[in-house]
Image (spheres, rainbow, N blue to C red):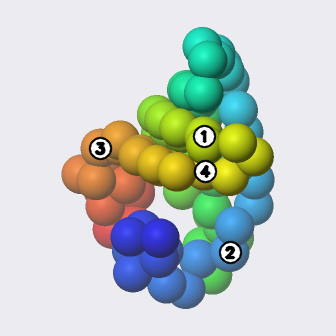
Amino acid sequence: MMIDGFTAGLKVKVFRIDNMISKGPMVVTERVDIFEKEDGSEVELPVLGIFEFEGDKIAKWREYFDLNQFMNQMA
């Protein structure tokens, strides 16, 4: 994933799904990805994910988030 470069040194704590809707082969999630820094503090990244399925496989996967919000928590 693209975000792997930004999350180096962070431990994934939880991907909390707040809302999820689907229509046909499309699923939209509103979630918060929560990471733990080496000092034990948390970084929270709100994310909107859009998944399009073909059969039982994900054909397209898009995610939208505010990178500045994430980077400000890393400072």
Nearest to N terminus: mark 2 or mark 4: 2
For residue 29, side relative to residue 69 (left or right)? right
Q: Are marks 4 and 1 in contact (CB under 8 Å)?
A: yes
Graded by Cα atoms within 10 Å as few (under 14), some (14 to 19) or many (20 or more), the crowding at tag 2 reads some
Image spot of residue 37 (x, y percent): 60, 73
Q: Nearer the viewer, mark 3 or mark 1?
A: 1
- Quadrant of res 43: bottom right
Pointer 3 or 4: first along the chain: 4
User: Which residue reaches farthest bottom?
Assistant: 9
Distance, label 3 to label 4, CA atoms, is: 24 Å
Q: In whole angstroms, how far apart are the C-alphas of marks 1 and 2?
A: 29 Å
Query: Among all residues in the image, which is located at the extreme front?
Result: 55
Query: Could you tell me if residue 20 is visible in this image?
Result: yes
Between circles 1 and 2, the one closer to the viewer is 1
Of the pair 37 and 56, the residue shown nearer to us: 56
Q: Are marks 1 and 2 in contact (CB under 8 Å)?
A: no
Of labels 1 and 2, earlier in sequence is 2
Count of marks placed on residues: 4
Residue 63: which quarter of the image? Answer: top left
Question: What amino acid type should be assigned to the residue bearing mark 3?
Answer: Asp
Residue 49 versus residue 68: which sits nearer the camera?
A: 49
**Which label belongs to residue 66?**
3
Residue at horizontal 55 percent and vertical 86 percent from the top: 9
- Per the rendering, the mark at residue 11 is 2
Kindly identify which numbered label has been placed on residue 53. Answer: 1
Residue 14: % across, % down: 75, 53
Q: On the image, numbered disc 4 is attached to which residue?
A: 58
Q: Amino acid at mark 4?
A: Ile
Which amino acid type is shown beneath numbered disc 2? Lys
Q: Nearer the viewer, residue 16 or 74?
A: 16
On screen, residue 38 above or below 67: below
